[in-house]
Amino acid sequence: MTPAQFIAGLPKAELHMHIEGSIEPALFIALAKRNNVPIAWKTEAELREAYSFRNLQSFLDLYYDGCRVLVHAADFQDVTREYLMRAHADRVLHAELFLGPQGHTARGVALGTVLEGTFAAMDAARREDGITSGLILLAQRHRSEEEALALLDAARPWADRLLGFGLGGAEVGNPPSKFVEFFRRCRERGFKVVAHAGEEGPAAYVREAIELLHVQRIDHGNSSLDDAALLRVLAQRQVPLTVCPLSNLKLKVVASMDVHPLKRLMDAGLCVTVNSDDPSFFGGYVNDNYIACQAALGLSRQALVALARNSFIAAFMPAAQRDAAL
Ligand code: ADE
Ligand code: ZN
């Protein structure tokens, strides 16, 4: 059995992917046509060529602009359903999806339109493929804490259907400490909380996310390796990291896969998981990420099994479902 076959057969959960980052070029062009949204690219090949990034910000500029093709509930439904079908094909049994409503409501798309379309796809995926999923709303960190609090209030009518809240977007210069009150209120209302930290930002941001925001998972967390004391805290408390290897390569967080920190983080005793982040932009879904790491870092079958197990341990899923998967 090849490593790719072994990885394909492993049941797994995916905990770090952005719905807006999973619009495949073909669907992107179809949505632009359907909604009469002018775009700068005519073909899928042209789009794929544009997916070359200097850093996180150069990606975010294209990503936020691309969101213009999402207008109606059916658009959010189509994107989410397509992702969940691909995840199901990768033997993902459970997915926790990120969505950034501010990028849509700021363009005049109602929050209800965004959420109802997304939930419809999540329900269909469960019914048709048996894949379970939860939705985590991200506040954009370049915006103010007041705007994040407004998002939390606006989401009240859907509180029972939402898994949690998180923080995404331009990291450097927008530390977790900017969002202490937002996270306090999210936790007070019973939501799960996560934050992107240590992707381009320093280890100090990871520490802030844990100590000031009290997050239950760190999204990325690569720079934790720069702080031995922080690594010990993460290992001791088993705070999961949702690592995104192909994303890190595409956004030049790492120079090449063979120097990716995934294995060093595992060796330090952390609960590490593998995820796709924005799969249509970064060249692969979750299995592609496992395969790239296995090839570059020489991961053993035991290490691959540990990563897949960690994805269930770190998931916000009912204990009975977790126990059945483990
Ligand atoms: N939003 C979508 N992808 C992201 C990433 N890799 N980092 C921060 N915010 C994001
Ligand atoms: Zn992300």
Image (cartoon, helix red, strand yellow):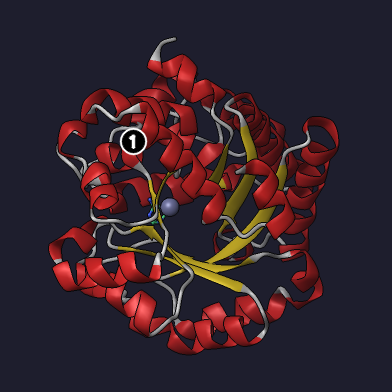
Q: Mark 1 near ligand 1 (CB under 8 Å)? A: no
Position of residue 107 in the picture relative to residue 271 (left or right): right
Would you say residue 279 is visible in this rendering? Answer: yes
Picture coordinates of residue 281 (x, y %)? 42, 35
Q: Nearer the viewer, residue 163 or 11?
A: 11
State whether residue 45 is above or below residue 30.
Answer: above
Q: Quadrant of the N terminus?
A: top left
Picture coordinates of residue 104 (x, y %)? 61, 58
Q: Nearer the viewer, residue 269 or 105?
A: 269
- Which residue occupies 68% across, 29% down? 85
State whether residue 326 is above or below residue 31.
Answer: below
Query: Which residue in the protein does label 1 denote?
Result: 246
The furthest residue to the top: 1
Residue type indicated by callout 1: Leu
Position of residue 83 in the picture relative to residue 52 (left or right): right
Image quadrant where residue 76 sits: top right
Q: How many marks overall?
A: 1
The furthest residue to the right: 127
Q: Quadrant of the C terminus?
A: top right
Q: Tell me the crowding category of disc 1: few under 14, some 14 to 19, or many 20 or more residues within 10 angstroms, Cα based.
A: many
Q: Nearer the viewer, residue 138 or 162?
A: 162
Image quadrant where residue 24 sits: top right
Picture coordinates of residue 242 (x, y %)? 42, 52
Picture coordinates of residue 311 (x, y %)? 51, 47
- Which residue occupies 56% across, 35% down? 23
Helix, strand or loop for disc 1: helix
Would you say residue 16 is visible in this rendering? Answer: no
- Which residue occupies 65% across, 33% down? 31
Image quadrant where residue 205 sits: bottom left
State whether residue 21 is above or below residue 236.
Answer: above
Position of residue 216 in the picture relative to residue 304 (left or right): right
